[in-house]
Image (tube, rainbow, N blue to C red):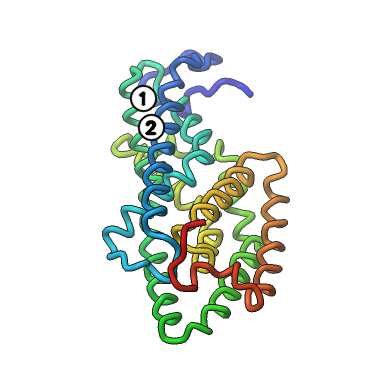
Amino acid sequence: MGAIQRPFTDDRPSRPGVLLPARELAVAWALIVLIAALAWVLTVGQALDMGIGPGTLGMALPLFLVLWLAMMAAMMLPSVAPVAVTWAKGIARQSGGATRALRTTEFLVGYLVAWTMFGLLAYGALALTGDLVDRDPAAGEWIGVAAFALAGLYQLGPLKSVCLRHCRSPLAQLMHYASYRPRMRDLRVGLHHGAYCVGCCWALMVVLIPLGVMNIAAMAGLAALIFLEKLWYRGPRLARVAGVAFLVLAVLAPFQDWLLPGLRTSTTPM
């Protein structure tokens, strides 16, 4: 791949055909890895304390959003790291390491804001399903069917393909971002890319309703699936295979209680 040139710079030109030295990108990589690792530590610690059960597990909205943000940082940042680093490559060569780290952080903040906004919808969905299960435990079976079926159908649909294509090949869009005005550019770039990522992966988060929003095994499995969908060369095919698998789980859900730990009384985390 050729060098990233003028479309990614801020105000001053850089020499064409010259890539940023690898050591200048190490800060960006280290920052992303550190945030994701800390997020996993926080998420696992909270999950072990809270267990698995229906609804929001008694969490008020502010606490839920804090934990949701940690979950999204843990699950999503490994797959978005190449995009963040590609954007960091476009930051002016004259910028120092501290400036580059600050701007990369701003990109990540925008990305996580998009997922936090989706967290508001997730909280409402969990609260609703929790209330339904409290009133009628048998409703959990059909909620599980609906959640798995929705995830499966979306995985096989055209909107998933469009958003996944963007997440896998964002270079053209990153070049478009260079036309943004400098003020809060990195935050807006992260927010825009995060919106595509939400469009790509929101249905996968829906399966946390039957599996349990604090189910460590489910979170790890979904994180691995998202990582492979975005970065593996057979990612689009894997997305379709996952869609078929979710449809199979939708058929099995009424007959297999182990598929619905998040719609039963609180249990030990998986």
Residue 263 x %, y % = 49, 72
Which of these two is toward me, 211 or 83? 211
Q: Which residue is mark 1?
A: 100
Report crowding for label 2: few under 14, some 14 to 19, many 20 or more residues within 10 A (C-alpha). Answer: many
From what the image shows, is residue 165 above or below residue 143? above
Which of these two is toward me, 112 or 263? 263
Amino acid type assigned to the residue bearing label 2 in the image: Thr
Residue at 57 percent across and 79 percent down: it is 141
From what the image shows, is residue 105 above or below residue 251? above
At mark 2, the secondary structure is helix
Query: Contact, CB < 8 Å: mark 1 with mark 2?
Result: yes
Residue at 51 percent across and 22 percent down: it is 5
Which of the 4 quarters of the picture holds residue 41? Answer: top left
From what the image shows, is residue 28 above or below residue 163? above
Report, in whole angstroms, how far the alpha carbon at label 1 lies from the one at label 2.
6 Å
- Quadrant, the N terminus: top right
Which of the 4 quarters of the picture holds residue 92? Answer: top left
Residue 200 x %, y % = 55, 54
At mark 1, the secondary structure is helix
Side (left or right) of 51 relative to 208: left
Amino acid type assigned to the residue bearing label 1 in the image: Arg
Residue at the farthest bottom position: 136
Residue 70: give its label: none
Q: Which residue is mark 2?
A: 104
Residue 33 x %, y % = 45, 32
Report crowding for label 1: few under 14, some 14 to 19, many 20 or more residues within 10 A (C-alpha). Answer: many
Residue at 35 percent across and 27 percent down: it is 101
Residue at 31 percent across and 29 percent down: it is 102
Residue 14 x %, y % = 44, 16
